[in-house]
Image (spheres, rainbow, N blue to C red):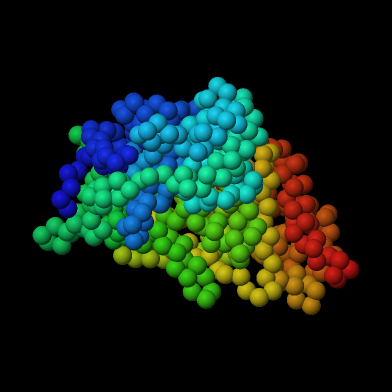
Amino acid sequence: MTQATNTVRFVLDGQIVEAQGKRRTTTVLDYLREQLQRTGTKEGCAEGDCGACVVMVGELNSAGTGVDYVATNSCIQLLPSLDGKSVKTVESLKKADGTLHPVQEEMVKCHGSQCGFCTPGIVMSLVNMVQTNAQPSRLEITDALSGNLCRCTGYAPIIDAAAKACEKKAALKIDDSSDIALLKEIKRPSTPTMSLDGEIIVQPVVRTKKGNEFVSPSTLAEVADYLVKHPTTTLLAGSTEIGLQVNKQFSRPDHIMYLGNVKELRQVDETDKAWRIGAAVSLTQVETLVAKAYPDFAEVLRRFGSPPIRSTATLAGNIANGSPIGDTMPCLMALGASLVLRRGDKSRRVSLDNFYTGMKKNVLEAGEFIEAIELPKPVSGQVFRAHKISKRFEQDISATCAAITYSLKSGKLSGVKLAYNGLAPSPCRAPKLEAVLEGKAPSDVKAADLDAAITASFTARDGLRATWVYRALVARNLVLEFIEEHTSEVA
Ligand SMILES: Cc1cc2nc3c(=O)[nH]c(=O)nc-3n(C[C@H](O)[C@H](O)[C@H](O)COP(=O)(O)OP(=O)(O)OC[C@H]3O[C@@H](n4cnc5c(N)ncnc54)[C@H](O)[C@@H]3O)c2cc1C
Ligand code: FES
Ligand code: FES
């Protein structure tokens, strides 16, 4: 390893920025605003909700010929995770001759801004979209904007501006040609550093005087080795939970390990029967992966946070965080997913059904981590349905989310797997409800039997987002809806 430690190196508009002496929990937003005076990027909520802080983060593509971008909430991303990447802010868009990006020009012409506080984030979300999609539908435009709140303008002129901008196809791509060589220059080696006696040494990106570290390994072996040596390390994947803990609870973990540069964890491997999804694969990628096989799962993911959240958030982070209202777990449980857990050089496979031991508690041992999620592919005749109930369509938290798989054998429900969030201390299967359904013709399923099974399965408790009465009703009605399409066939 030749690179100096304690320096976060990233590319900003054709220049390498070396950020030295920063805390391991300094956010990208704070660094941009306070050190680089890039004050176009705003802070609204500091928790990933409002989108005022959206910037584009780029990585060299696999061929090394271009830069792939994601829109991301800079308020919840930690600066050291930017090491080796590039960033574009709203200030990056204006050309040397003063020309604005078409999205900016049309925002002016279509009156897409009033107080302007949300505008830089909105512009960056749209500019990010048009890098890969120059002909977005109205739905794709509204999806791209679903993580950007505007309190005064109203969205119609903003959507019109996006559509108008896309008429200027030739000018939509940002010019980042000068960044490519620099991204190659700051790339860290992709093999572990070894000591003379063959020990893996993980070089920190940041090390404080007290010896606290932010490390960003590039191989699975380094991750496993470091965690055995430092079992209390906080793993950082997409930072959409950790970023909140840093900003809102002032969490300052001693050791932080970023997983986003680990090649093996960013891979999806495929067999005839299953996908093996690495722990650092983003939800955006998972959404694309499951779109055809499990459209309802893709819809749950489309409603998970917003595009800048999904661009970094991971399945492993959702699962490990273990929130009772985590949205991916009911889908994964109903589909029979299992986890590959790793500690040192030993791996074990645990069904997701058996992962949780209580509220935010799980079977992970000290130094153990989630390496991958194994998701079975659909089999012939299998029905999969899922639906998330929340007050807003997107960027909202579940009252409950339910998912089911089954097939019909001679008109009877068979192999039923049903799972929920929001009803228990952790997302879980519902074996008593499954028993009510198993072996019955869909038209013979009685609401009262489902109600009784719900009462017998879960402790009634009201929550901030919904009363128990509402949740229990929804939990039953979703099941009836999931089997309704087959009731007429057998009635
Ligand atoms: C604005 C906003 C909207 C959101 N909307 C939703 C939503 O609609 N539905 C929903 O379910 N959640 C939502 N969340 C919560 C969050 O986005 C998810 O839980 C997300 O999947 C976390 O993934 P991450 O990669 O960002 O995790 P991180 O924040 O990086 O980590 C989360 C936890 O998992 C641990 N961890 C990460 N990777 C591993 C690993 N490989 N092995 C073991 N432990 C690991 C971390 O140490 C940490 O404790 C939202 C969050 C925000 C800020
Ligand atoms: S400041 Fe609101 S999402 Fe970042
Ligand atoms: S223009 Fe004021 S919040 Fe959008």
Q: Image point 76% across, 64% down: which residue?
A: 437
In this view of the protein, which residue sits in the foreground, 58 or 300?
58
Q: Residue furthest top?
A: 115
Q: Residue 239, percent across and down?
A: 43, 43
Report if residue 377 is visible in the image.
yes
Q: Residue furthest right?
A: 491
**Residue 212 seen in render:** no
Spot the residue most to the bottom.
Answer: 410
* Total tally of numbered discs in the picture: 0
Which residue is at the front of the view, 421 or 297?
297
Residue at 62% across, 52% down: 300
Left or right: residue 275 compared with residue 79: right
Residue at point 30% right, 46% down?
A: 179
Q: Position of residue 142 (x, y in %)?
A: 62, 42
The relative height of residue 390 versus residue 268 in the rendered view (above or below) is above
The foreground one among 330 and 237 is: 237
User: Is 11 situated left or right of 143 in this image?
Assistant: left
Considering only vertical position in the picture, is 213 above or below 67? above
Q: Looking at the rendering, in which quadrant would you find the C terminus?
A: bottom right
- Left/right of residue 246 with respect to residue 212 in the rendered view: right
Task: Find the residue positioned furthest to the left.
Answer: 196
Q: Position of residue 188 (x, y in %)?
A: 24, 52
- Look at 35% across and 34% down and name the residue there: 96
Left or right placement of residue 214 versus residue 339 in this view? left
Q: Position of residue 362 (x, y in %)?
A: 48, 52
